[in-house]
Image: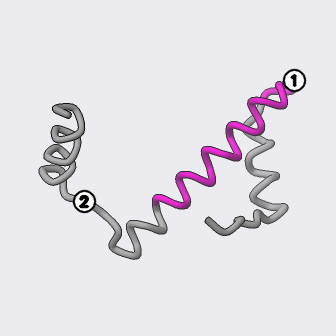
Amino acid sequence: MPTKQISKSELKNIFKELPDKVDIEEVMYRLYLLQKIEAGESDIKEGKILSHSRAIKRLSKKWQN
């Protein structure tokens, strides 16, 4: 997966939501989460989705093996 760049304004918005004191792990987690959400939104726009019933069938198959 290609590396996504983030703008300073996006970082500022993320930092505004953080408490005054925060662990580095929390910052890294939020950036990771943002990346995953944006990747999911991109997949949806590109039509890379499964219907609910198809997802259930796929997961059921994995659980039964």
**17 and 27: which is toward the camera:** 27
Q: Which residue is drawn at 35% across and 68% down?
A: 48
Measuring from the top left, give residue 65's x and y in whole percent.
Answer: 20, 34
Q: Is residue 9 above or below residue 33?
A: below
Camera-near label (2 vs 1) is 2
Measuring from the top left, give residue 26's x and y in whole percent.
Answer: 74, 30
Q: Any magenta on residue 38?
A: yes
Q: Is residue 56 above or below residue 11?
A: above
What residue sits right under mark 2 in the picture? 50
Comes first in the chain, label 2 or label 1: 1
Would you say 4 lies left or right of 36 here? right
Secondary structure at badge 2 equals loop
User: Which image quadrant is residue 23 in?
Assistant: top right
Secondary structure at badge 1 equals loop
Specify the segment rendered in magenta. Answer: 19-40
Would you say 34 lies left or right of 23 here? left
Question: Callout 1, which amino acid?
Answer: Lys
User: Which image quadrant is residue 44 in?
Assistant: bottom left
